[in-house]
Amino acid sequence: MSLSRPRRPFRRAVLGLAASAVLGLGGCSLDQEEEVRLQIQDWVKLGETQYFFSRVNCTAALFEVKATRITSMVKKARDIEAGMRAITENKPVAFEVGGMSPTQVTEAIMTLDLPQGLGVLASGTGGKDCMAVEMEEAYYNTLHDPTSVLIFHPEARFMAIFDRRNMRLFFSRGR
């Protein structure tokens, strides 16, 4: 009796499962670039994608922006309280608070409502694991720039940072 004969079906099954797993991993990302663009393209005039990476637990993207204006398709908050009301109503909101960087906006939200602030913070830091080193540094600098605008989508749980100084938009989402 040959031992190789009974192993062939098992071997084919194992190879088939391995191939399925490898092919399936390609679809195991949190976001697709086209979907991300669709979520934010009504808010700012997007140009080319400069960076996009997504896996099962995070997404990071960087888009060129063609105009400095944020459209009326997203609620604009001129103060923290107005932005927080939009968040509690599950509406996307752009924090255009004069003289405050996205980091300062997040800290102010956390001061007034810690759970809500932690939600914003988690969205902003969640994409970090998907960022290239150069992108991390640029993102960090943008978070501390008072000319940048924090855009938060509470339902979709992502943060976008509009870097007006360099005409680009960072996208971050984590799980």
Image (cartoon, rainbow, N blue to C red):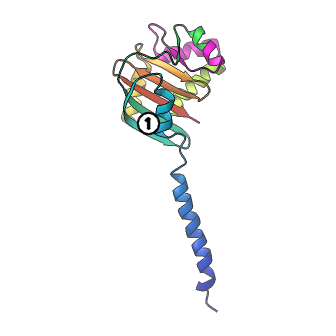
Q: Is residue 129 visible?
A: no
Q: Tell me if residue 89 comes above or below residue 2 in the rendering.
A: above
In the rendered image, residue 79, in percent from the top left (x then y), is placed at: 54, 7
Going by the image, does 129 lie left or right of 163? right
In the rendered image, residue 58, in percent from the top left (x then y), is placed at: 53, 38
In the rendered image, residue 15, in percent from the top left (x then y), is placed at: 55, 69
Q: Which residues are magenta?
A: 85-114
Please identify the quarter of the rendering in which residue 157 is found.
top right
Going by the image, does 78 lie left or right of 89? left
Which residue is pictured at 42% across the width and 17% down the height? 148
Which residue is pictured at 48% across the width and 17% down the height? 102
Which residue is pictured at 61% across the width and 77% down the height? 9
What residue is pinned by disc 1?
131
Q: Tell me if residue 65 comes above or below residue 31 in the rendering.
A: above
Q: Tell me if residue 140 comes above or below residue 30 in the rendering.
A: above
Q: Tell me if residue 42 comes above or below residue 34 in the rendering.
A: above
Going by the image, does 105 lie left or right of 6? left
